[in-house]
Amino acid sequence: MRDYEAMYILRPEMAEEEYAAAVEKFNALIQANGGEVVKTDIWGKRRLAYEIEKLREGYYVLVTFKAGPELPQELERNFRIADSVLRYLVTRLPE
């Protein structure tokens, strides 16, 4: 299993319960596909470096996880189709 890190930004107009549900959904997706969530770091609402879809803020979440090489593609596919996700980046951490 390899170490990965996923950073994603959720829409700022969501309610606190919706943020928690979205974070839990993506963590459950990692675990359902044979991965192991090491750490979930919720940064909260932050100002974006540039406007995205006329929004100036976003809700930042950083997840560190261990998984096989096929899981990041599945995770990115789910980020892409989720309406609540503005931007995402999944990277492999160095050994």
Image: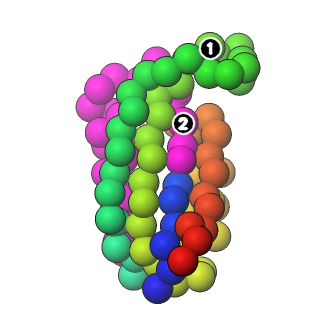
Could you tell me the amino acid type at mark 2? Ile
Q: Earlier in the sequence, mark 1 or mark 2?
A: 2
Per the image, label 2 sits on a secondary structure element best described as: strand
Badge 2 crowding class, 10 Å Cα cut-off, few under 14, some 14 to 19, many 20 or more, is many
Query: Magenta segment: does it hold 27?
Result: yes
The vertical placement of 22 against 27, above or below, is above
Query: Magenta segment: does it hold 17?
Result: yes
Q: Give the quadrant of residue 42.
A: top left
Residue 70 on image: x %, y %: 59, 80
Residue identified by numbered label 1: 56
Question: Residue 9 — which label?
Answer: 2
Range drawn in magenta: 7-33
Per the image, label 1 sits on a secondary structure element best described as: strand
Q: Can residue 33 be seen in this snapshot?
A: no
Could you tell me the amino acid type at mark 1? Arg
The vertical placement of 68 against 32, above or below, is below
Q: Can residue 70 be seen in this snapshot?
A: yes
Cα separation, mark 1 vs mark 2, equals: 12 Å
